[in-house]
Amino acid sequence: MSTVRVVVVDDQEVVRAGFAALLATQPDLTVTGTAADGVEAVSVCRAERPDVVLMDVRMPGMDGIEATRRITAAQDPPRVLMLTTFDLDEHVYDALVAGASGFLLKDVTAERLFDAVRVVAAGEALLAPTVTRRLIAQFARLRPRPAAPELAALTPRETDVLRLIAQGLSNSEIAARLVVGEETVKTHVSRVLRKLDLRDRAQAVVCAYESGLVVPRTG
């Protein structure tokens, strides 16, 4: 069984120690370092090369957004899971745009924490349940639309897949919706990410909203 290497970043020592202690109870998870701010996080990640970073959004000095941007810009970067107190936090949206793969509320249960780290380490984005989609929709609607990747590069089926990713469907759910095999969906997802130069499904959701492919609901 391969071990997932984790770095925990939070400016509150109790929070850092608490998450590190919880993760240490799992045989397949190991905490290789901790950091109290963004600058330290970048340094620790450079030295330890973790698989997953639990990153606090709000920290003095360099915050979690800038730290995420720097960490995910490195070669073969770790996956970043943002930690936040509020589910509708504009800073989390900024972090997803910066390269984070999802987020967790700080009052997360132990089992949910473990599952989240494993899911993200496996290369999936943590977009469930509906909070992340709601957050992206809200802040994509409030902001001027930036230049989005050229969706014309996608085939009609790939466009359908991107739209369903943005709705939060898993590969198996997309397969059922489109009446195709799950392996076919995986192939489509890989092509969408490659053609649009997106890192993972979280980036695909942001892209779908910001390009106007998926229109946020009002009200």
Image (cartoon, grey):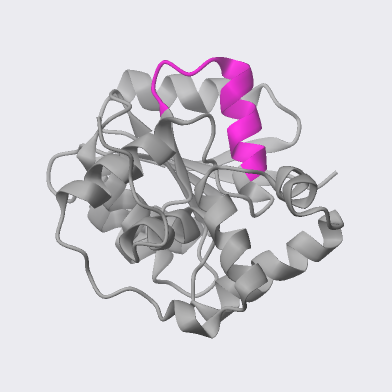
Q: Is residue 118 left or right of residue 54?
A: right
Instruction: Residue at 50% x, 65% y: name it.
Output: 77
Q: Quadrant of residue 59?
A: top left
Is-magenta flag for residue 40? no
Q: In which quarter of the image is residue 145?
A: bottom left
Quarter the N terminus occupies = top right
Instruction: Residue at 56% x, 26% y: name it.
Output: 113
Position above or below: 135 against 73:
above
Q: Where is residue 97 in the image (x, y as percent from the top left)?
A: 33, 58
Is-magenta flag for residue 116? yes
Whether residue 209 is visible here, answered yes or no, is: yes
Position above or below: 107 against 152:
above
Whether residue 50 is visible here, answered yes or no, is: no
Q: Position of residue 155 (x, y in %)?
A: 62, 78
- From which residue to which does the magenta span run? 105-119
Instruction: Residue at 59% x, 72% y: name it.
Output: 192
Along the line of sight, the residue nearer the viewer: 191 or 26? 191
Along the line of sight, the residue nearer the viewer: 214 or 8? 214
Q: Is residue 167 left or right of residue 184?
A: left
Instruction: Residue at 32% x, 65% y: name it.
Output: 70
Q: Where is residue 29 in the image (x, y as percent from the top left)?
A: 67, 36
Quarter the C terminus occupies = top left
Q: Position of residue 151 (x, y in %)?
A: 46, 77
Q: How many labels does the image show?
A: 0
Q: Quadrant of residue 39?
A: bottom left
Position above or below: 126 against 131:
below
Q: Which residue is most to the bottom?
A: 153
The main secondary structure of the magenta stretch is helix
